[in-house]
Amino acid sequence: MRELNFDLLHLLEGDRQGSHGTRRMRRYALMQAAETLHRLGYRGLRARGLKGRHVEALAAEWQRQGLKAGTMRNRMALLRWWAVKVGKPGMVRPDNESYGIVGDAS
């Protein structure tokens, strides 16, 4: 298992916030983000090593994949959760528009 995946699983296990379904969705999405970062060439990354460049790379990759704005907003919320849990809430900007995520909010 990659170090980032292991670290994220450890964060998830320590946080019992939300229903089982919410925690399962959070786990799936964060593991997916970790796999995407690995595929983009960020090897040896640890959960506490989250930086703005990683968030920007994920947002750019999601746009390249053509994901809908709502999906990207949900994923950004999970990246914010991750940043808060590792004590770096400022790593993910609070507005999605700065990452190029625009679309109707409905």
Image (cartoon, helix red, strand yellow):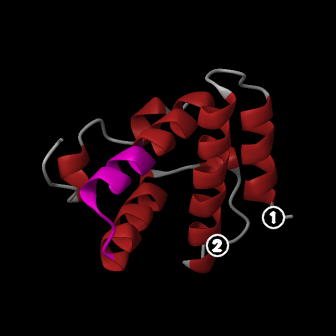
Q: Provide the residue designation for mark 1.
A: 2
Q: Is residue 33 visible?
A: yes
- Residue at x 59% of width, y 34% of height: 22
Q: Provide the residue designation for mark 2.
A: 38
Return the residue found at the far right. 1
Residue 101 x %, y %: 22, 56
Q: Is residue 11 left or right of residue 63?
A: right
Is 87 one of the magenta-colored residues? no
10 Å crowding of disc 2: few (<14), some (14-19), many (20+): some
- Residue at x 33% of width, y 47% of height: 73
Picture quadrant of residue 106: top left
Picture quadrant of residue 2: bottom right
Quadrant for the N terminus in the image: bottom right
In depth, the one of 67 and 9 nearer the eye is 67
- Residue at x 32% of width, y 40% of height: 93
Main SS, magenta region, reads helix
Q: Earlier in the sequence, mark 1 or mark 2?
A: 1
Residue 54 x %, y %: 48, 60
- Dot 1 and dot 2 residues touching (CB under 8 Å): yes
Q: Secondary structure at mark 1?
A: loop
User: Which span of residues is magenta-colored?
Assistant: 66-76
